[in-house]
């Protein structure tokens, strides 16, 4: 185990923590931007540091293809290769099974991909995945899990869950650097609470440094989504970090934090920036709209990032989808927004005002009081009273 | 190993061949010392030969301040007049001061005007721009044609002009119609109403009034009048017409100008015809302008005939006023322009290099190197390297050893090679930073050579070192 996890504040299930990793000390709840190929698209390391990024993600599948695990190892690991001084986390390559399924064939041995670069088959076994991640050298590495979409039903889900546990053992055996890298297990089991429970207990038995809740954020309905998160956070140990993979939208992060999760990752903020959409407290702002062409306000008047301090919506509108600079500036702002969200969550829990923060967040996003039912249900379980945010139901 | 140049590289770039075992030699530029933060009240003294490159403090949270017109005015002073005689007899040193009595340091000329898209460099955002050499990197190009579609002139005016709009209140913008990338002068579409440009939103016609609307709303520090710029192969009749139109539009622009020519660069055209050029230059000199924009260059004339044309114009133009030329971007073209007495150069050389994955590596201390060292036997192109090449896969050195730009301080050739291979935007950002830094360094070298009165020697040595790779056989592996 190469981390220390210290809870520094609580409200019911929600917790704020200080997580000490080999390369950096992070505060949770925390959002991690995704730098798939060894870079966050359009932003330099200095900008990421200015914005307040603590951990960024790299992707084993992509990095193993280019530039290759051997090369990264030879050049001293991904931290040195990218010259990133803070935390790194690598995904196992498991998600590509789902997103690139038409190229993949899953067996007990591992996953065979058809490489999109040269068409050659590439077998990813648990051992291989861990070996590659050992060479990349991130602070946190993920076990290879058998991922299925939550929209699938039937025996495949159970098969995948048990296989995930078997692969977990193979990952643990293959892990050569437990003193420098933390191997997280991933809870699978689809939307079935029985399967999820078996998986959680199986992983907890193996006494891992941290746990992730996987297989979500893939199109399932929100009511099922939060229930799985709630069940897992209730069953996972208190003294270890919990990472909900692939989340996501600011609202989802607030709900999951209220239910007791600590870490999140998603391509959403940076991807939506490249399509001209900015994240704001009220929701989203589509800079491409013609109405933006003469709007002289900053993207977000409550935001203190470099973009909001210097640029108007009108100018950004003239850049988006035309110039690379538009993508860069919006990515900068969107990530600043996510870091501010993370910081606000952490500080509001530490300072004992978490419910007020949640209420303020919901009121700003849903000024008419139309908070979605799933959020109300989740907050009830989280023990946060949001009745003042919801409009009275018409009788 | 044959290196493939990217398809987007302009025809003016050479293909370069890299051998498996060679790397550009690192050089010890004495003048590229580590940067220092500038003093709070910089003096207006000129940079000495050994002055370190300065950068300013990062400026991420600047509050907006609306600067009055008075402070925007720029004043040009010739600090070292041309020698008058010799091959490079017209070359001179100058300084651009920002009016209003502020503490900003002057920009020394000959200088590079950094190209922009809608007021910002293509890939370098304002916080990264702050880390480029100071005050050299304060000089930016503005192409009014970029604002034909949006934002509207009313919106730009409300925001307070281009400086406010792009968050670069301390920078200087020099405007000329057209650029070499996105807004190309289309002489076939130009008529008596206005000048035509090929833009991403199609061919656009802009008349003096529309042009001045954009100028008066963006409020650049200096701006060139609207011109009919024609390529070198047009008929004499068409050429004469371009002069008449350009002069008329200059008068139109001046009559619409609230500052009465205080920030105007009168456009001088005349195509490939020396007599026409002289006539136009004489006419424009008689107008009440603060400087001159030499239009119509870089549109098809050969580098050999260009010298005579440039000199024909600068011979006539008053010495004390500033001269700006567009589209002469290559180092050889810059040296040619400096020799003819040009002060400002707007170049998209950096942009094309960046898109192609090239990084500039040529030594900047041309005069310091022994001549033999520059001509050392090697099959290298000393100018630039193509970071797509596989020889850089594991190269953990910076692009240029001891370069003080952000890219070279923080990243390796191997990382850039990877970024280019996976088509990541960060590659262009890092390359544009380095290339801009390096090219600004080139201009510093030129100024230093002028101060030491060794410009002709500098030019000779530089041209020789550029030709080394062409005269040697390259092993084809």
Image (tube, coloured by chain):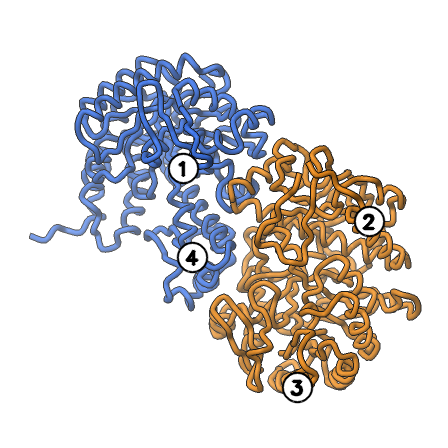
Chain colours: A blue, B orange
Residue B86 falls in which quadrant of the image?
Answer: bottom right
Name the spot of residue B235 as percent of width and height, x first: 68, 81
Badge 1: chain ID: A
> Label 1 vs label 3: CA separation?
63 Å
Q: Mark on residue B465? A: 2
What whole-number distance in Å separates the C-alpha atoms at marks 3 and 4?
48 Å
| Tag in front: 1 or 3 | 3
The residue wearing badge 3 is B241
Q: Quadrant of the C terminus of chain B?
A: top right
Left or right of A170: which side holds B363? right
Marked residue nearer the N-terminal end (1 or 4):
1
Q: Can you name the residue that lies furthest to the left here?
A: A395
State left or right for residue B294 relative to residue A329. Answer: right
Chain letter for mark 3, please: B
Disc 3 packing (10 Å; few <14; some 14–19; many ≥20): some
Numbered disc in front, either 4 or 2: 2
Q: Residue at x 51, y 44 (%)?
A: B423
Label 4 lies in what chain?
Answer: A
Numbered disc 4: secondary structure: loop
Q: What percent of the width, then of the height, locates residue A239?
A: 36, 20
User: Mark 1 = which residue?
Assistant: A31
Picture coordinates of residue A148 (x, y %)? Answer: 27, 30
- Name the residue that disc number 4 marks: A299
Residue at 78% across, 79% down: B274
């Amino acid at each position: 185990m190469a981390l220390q996890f210290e809870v520094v504040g609580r409200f019911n299930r929600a917790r704020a923590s200080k997580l000490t990793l080999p390369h950096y000390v992070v505060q949770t709840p925390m959002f991690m931007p995704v730098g798939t190929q060894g870079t966050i698209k359009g932003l330099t390391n200095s900008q990421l540091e200015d914005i307040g990024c603590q951990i960024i993600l790299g992707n084993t599948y992509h990095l193993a293809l280019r530039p290759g695990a051997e090369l990264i190892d030879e050049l001293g690991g991904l931290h040195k290769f990218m010259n990133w001084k803070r935390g790194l986390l690598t995904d196992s390559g498991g998600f590509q099974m789902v997103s690139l399924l038409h190229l993949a064939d899953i067996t007990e041995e591992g996953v065979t991909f058809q490489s999109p670069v040269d068409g050659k088959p590439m077998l990813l076994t648990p051992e291989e995945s861990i070996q590659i991640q050992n060479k990349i050298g991130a602070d946190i590495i993920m076990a290879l899990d058998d991922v299925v979409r939550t929209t699938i039903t039937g025996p495949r889900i159970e098969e995948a869950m048990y296989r995930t546990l078997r692969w977990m053992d193979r990952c643990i055996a293959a892990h050569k650097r437990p003193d420098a890298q933390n191997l997280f297990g991933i809870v699978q089991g689809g939307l079935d609470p029985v399967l999820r429970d078996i998986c959680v207990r199986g992983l907890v038995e193996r006494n891992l440094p941290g746990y992730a809740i996987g297989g979500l954020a893939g199109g399932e309905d929100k009511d099922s989504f939060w229930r799985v998160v709630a069940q897992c956070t209730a069953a996972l140990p208190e003294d270890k970090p919990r990472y909900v993979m692939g989340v996501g939208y600011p609202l989802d992060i607030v709900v999951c934090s209220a239910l007791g999760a600590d870490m999140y990752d998603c391509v959403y903020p940076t991807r939506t920036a490249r399509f001209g959409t900015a994240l704001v407290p009220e929701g989203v702002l589509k800079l491409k709209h013609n109405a933006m062409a003469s709007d002289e306000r900053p993207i977000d008047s409550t935001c203190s990032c470099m973009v909001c301090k210097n640029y108007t919506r009108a100018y950004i509108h003239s850049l988006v989808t035309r110039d690379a600079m538009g993508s860069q500036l919006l990515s900068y702002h969107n990530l600043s927004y996510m870091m501010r969200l993370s910081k606000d969550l952490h500080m509001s829990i530490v300072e004992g005002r978490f419910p007020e923060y949640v209420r303020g967040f919901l009121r700003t996003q849903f000024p008419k009081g139309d908070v979605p039912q799933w959020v109300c249900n989740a907050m009830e379980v989280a023990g946060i009273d949001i009745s003042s945010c919801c409009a009275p139901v018409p009788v | 190993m044959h290196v493939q140049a990217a398809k987007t590289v302009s025809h003016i770039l050479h293909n370069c061949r890299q051998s498996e075992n060679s790397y550009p030699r690192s050089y010890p530029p004495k003048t590229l010392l580590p940067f220092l933060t500038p003093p709070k009240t910089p003096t207006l003294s000129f940079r000495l030969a050994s002055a370190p490159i300065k950068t300013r403090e990062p400026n991420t949270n600047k509050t907006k301040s609306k600067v009055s017109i008075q402070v925007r005015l720029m004043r040009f002073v010739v600090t070292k007049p041309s020698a008058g005689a010799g091959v490079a007899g017209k070359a001179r040193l100058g300084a651009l001061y920002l009016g209003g009595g502020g503490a900003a340091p002057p920009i020394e000329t000959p200088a590079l005007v950094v190209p922009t898209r809608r007021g910002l460099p293509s890939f370098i955002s304002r916080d990264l721009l702050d880390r480029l050499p100071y005050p050299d990197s304060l000089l930016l190009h503005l192409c009014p044609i970029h604002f034909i579609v949006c934002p509207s002139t009313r919106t730009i005016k409300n925001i307070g002009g281009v400086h406010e709009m792009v968050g670069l209140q301390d920078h200087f913008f020099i405007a000329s119609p057209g650029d070499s990338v996105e807004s190309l002068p289309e002489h076939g579409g130009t008529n008596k109403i206005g000048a035509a440009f090929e833009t991403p939103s199609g061919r656009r016609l802009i008349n003096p009034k529309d042009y001045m609307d954009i100028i008066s709303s963006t409020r650049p520090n200096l701006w060139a009048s609207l011109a009919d710029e024609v390529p070198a192969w047009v008929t004499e009749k068409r050429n004469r017409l371009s002069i008449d139109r350009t002069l008329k539009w200059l008068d139109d622009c001046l009559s619409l100008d609230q500052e009465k020519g205080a920030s105007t660069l009168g456009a001088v055209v005349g195509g490939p015809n020396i007599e026409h050029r002289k006539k136009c230059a004489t006419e424009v000199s008689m107008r009440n302008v603060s400087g001159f924009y030499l239009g119509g260059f870089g549109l098809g004339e050969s580098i050999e005939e260009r010298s005579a044309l440039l000199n024909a114009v600068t011979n006539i133009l008053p010495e004390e006023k500033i001269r700006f030329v567009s589209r002469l971007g290559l180092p050889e073209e810059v040296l040619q322009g400096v020799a003819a007495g040009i002060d400002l150069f707007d170049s998209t050389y950096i942009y094309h290099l960046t898109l192609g994955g090239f990084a500039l590596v040529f030594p900047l201390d041309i005069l310091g190197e022994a001549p033999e060292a520059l001509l050392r036997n090697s099959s290298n192109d000393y100018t630039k390297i193509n970071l797509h090449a596989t020889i850089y896969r594991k190269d953990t050195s910076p692009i240029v050893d001891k370069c003080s730009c952000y890219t070279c301080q923080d990243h390796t050739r191997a990382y850039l090679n990877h970024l280019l291979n996976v088509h990541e935007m960060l590659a262009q950002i890092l390359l544009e930073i380095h290339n801009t830094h390096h090219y600004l360094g080139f201009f510093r070298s030129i100024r230093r050579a002028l101060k030491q009165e060794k410009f002709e020697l500098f030019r000779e040595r530089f041209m020789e070192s550029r030709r080394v790779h062409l005269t040697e056989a390259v092993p084809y592996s």
